[in-house]
Image (cartoon, rainbow, N blue to C red):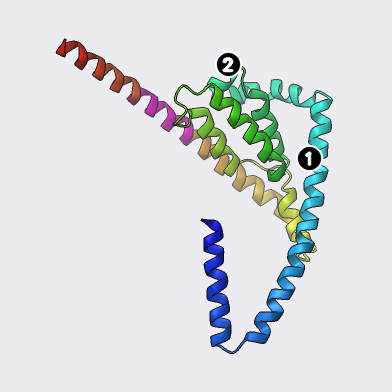
Amino acid sequence: MLGKIFGIICIVSVFFGIACGNTGQLGSAVIDGASSAVTLTLALLGMMCLWSGILNVLKEAGAIKKLTVLMTPILKFFFPDAYKSGVGSEEIAANVAANLLGVGNAATPLALSAMKKLQLQNPTPEIASRDMITLAVLNTSSVSLIPSTVITLLRSSGSENPFDIIIPIWITSFTCAAMALILCRALGSATRVRTIRSKDYKSLKTQARQ
């Protein structure tokens, strides 16, 4: 879907560029954009490789397991099923750690691994479990202590003070993550109660028919 949207934007841009007689500027923008995209990709690739390597070193050194223990009191509340079964808890903690470092690209494989393990424990495979939904929401609104990707983008764009965004990002990301987790927890509990009541109602209805 996203590819179709970008395709339509490109087609519309080319059409209006030709219609307005700006074909020369359009051609220059395409060439400059392609060159900038390669430079930006290499910059992001370097940052992603750096933090991915750091995360792998931490994992091999056992730091991820220690981090899992430290984060257990908090994550256990928001991921009760995963921590009760012990399946996917380490991947969830590693994913949260990667997001805290602001390395969303490095956190994605960890989130996918956690999702696969959570799916194995999912009693209804066709419907995402509460923990799976919470993990997906937390990945889109996670707290970022070191927004390395955004800092890299700003630096690549010529910003002289790319680190000035850190405090605003702390405030906004913490607020978003807190609200997202609270809503997931509240709505998950409400849905669970409604499901239990629905099952009880169906059971009573079946007994009445018998």
Q: Residue furthest bottom?
A: 21
Drawn side of residue 179 relative to residue 75, left or right: left
CB under 8 Å between discs 2 and 1: no
Q: Residue 102: in sight, yes or no?
A: no
Start-end of magenta stretch: 183-194
Q: Residue type at mark 2?
A: Ser
The span from disc 2 to disc 1 (Cα, nearest Å) is 28 Å
Quadrant of the image occupied by residue 51: top right
At x 80%, y 23%, the residue is: 62
- Residue at the spot of label 1: 52
Q: Residue type at mark 1?
A: Ser
Rendered location of residue 108, percent (x, y): 66, 40
Drawn side of residue 162 relative to residue 71, left or right: right
Is residue 204 or residue 72 the one in the foreground? 204
Q: Is residue 189 above or below residue 148?
A: above
Position of the C terminus by quadrant = top left
Rendered location of residue 204, percent (x, y): 22, 14
Q: Is residue 188 magenta?
A: yes
- Residue at the spot of label 2: 85
Rendered location of residue 32, percent (x, y): 74, 74
Q: Is residue 10 magenta?
A: no
Q: Secondary structure at mark 2?
A: helix
At x 69%, y 77%, the residue is: 29
* Neighbour tally class for label 1: few under 14, some 14-19, many 20 plus, Cα within 10 Å: some
